[in-house]
Amino acid sequence: MVNYYVTIPGAKGLIEIERPQKNCWIHAEAPTAEEAALISALTGISENLMKSALDEEETAHIDVEGKAKLIVIDIPKKIEDAETGSISTIPLTLICTDEYLVSVCTATTHVLNDFFEGKVKNVDTAQRPKLAYQIMYNNSVRFLYYLRQIDRASDRIQKSLSKSMKNEELLQLVDLQKTLVFFSAALTANYAVTQRIYNMVKLDQNERDALDILDDVTIENRQALEMCSIYREIIKGTLDAFAAIVNNNQNIVMKFLTAITILLSIPMVVAGFWGMNTEVPFEGKLWGFWVAVGVALVISVVIAIFMARKKMF
């Protein structure tokens, strides 16, 4: 699906148009091969750049081919429910030409929807590089938003674990940890791309006004990286702590069962001795049974007191 957007002086936000025109924003969401060929013919973007934009495994980087500048960044994408940690990353491709800004993504994303819904101010499709940097900034803000959601989900899971440790909660923590690993890799790659763009813009007199936006992108990206690292350490520490608690509880149960087994084995040993097919003390006496039981109880009590003092149960 391909959509075309422009900004008009005096009007608020982006306006969708039916046909492309100069200085418009062309957005392609999961485009077909025919739509990609149409964009290539319309904008003059080479087929190689379009193929790169359609690659779902493309990593964050920047490339310049002729007058077209290609920027690939990783963006967060909610798969199912953010509270379960089902968030991954997908590539977003931005291509700036002399007349158009082209964005290509394989799925719907809030990073771009914020622009289409008028949530981002000071948008001008005629200033294509600046608009691309605004998208990068909004992407960093969206990473921070999801990181805060992950933090809240982690707190909720930890509270549940404190009451009852279940595999479901532990698996959710592992899922959050996996998400943070993806985020960390994506943010690191995006940060490298931002730094390279920043160095290129400093040398371009026509884009000097975009330096402030790139500074903000760098700051937000660095903050997201730091938050991601902190949350990863917290979840890692939580998993290690609960693993230690599980092992400790298992050791306590095993120690208790061992103590009970020892205590129960004493009467059986005494009964075994008095049940031999040889003459034993008090043989043939009715009260001899109670003597054997008494001996077993006395030994059991003595050993139980000893074990209690040694805190064996």
Image (cartoon, rainbow, N blue to C red):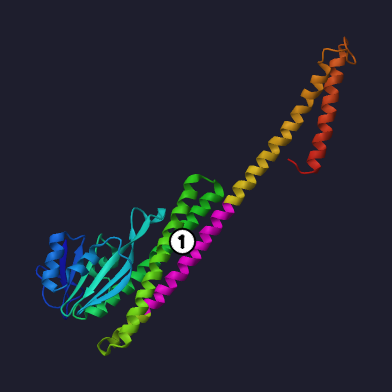
Residue 276 in the magenta stretch? The answer is no
In the image, is residue 116 above or below residue 268? below
Residue under the point 55% across and 48% down: 163
Specify the amino acid type for callout 1.
Asp
Give the residue at the far right of this rendering. 281
Q: Where does the image place residue 143, in percent across and percent down from the top left? A: 38, 67
Q: In this view, does 312 lie to the left or right of 196?
A: right
Which residue: 55% across, 56% down? 238
Magenta part mainly helix, strand or loop?
helix
Q: Where is residue 210 in the image (x, y as percent from the top left)?
A: 30, 83
Q: What stretch is highlighted in magenta?
A: 216-242
**Residue drawn at the location 36% of the way across and 59% of the way down:** 88
State which quarter of the image contains the N terminus.
bottom left
The residue tagged 1 is 151
Q: Is 94 placed above or below 178 here? A: below
**Magenta span includes 224:** yes
Q: Which residue lies furthest to the bottom in this view?
A: 205
Residue drawn at (69%, 35%), measured in percent from left and top? 257
Q: Quadrant of residue 298?
A: top right
| Residue 46 placement: quadrant | bottom left
Within 10 angstroms of label 1, few (less than 14), some, or many (20 or more) residues? many
Tell which of 31 and 76 is nearer to you: 31
**For the residue labelled by badge 1, is the local secondary structure a helix, a strand or a loop?**
helix
**187 shown above or below 237:** below
Q: Is residue 301 left or right of residue 180?
A: right
Q: Residue furthest top?
A: 284
Q: Where is residue 284 in the image (x, y as percent from the top left)?
A: 87, 9
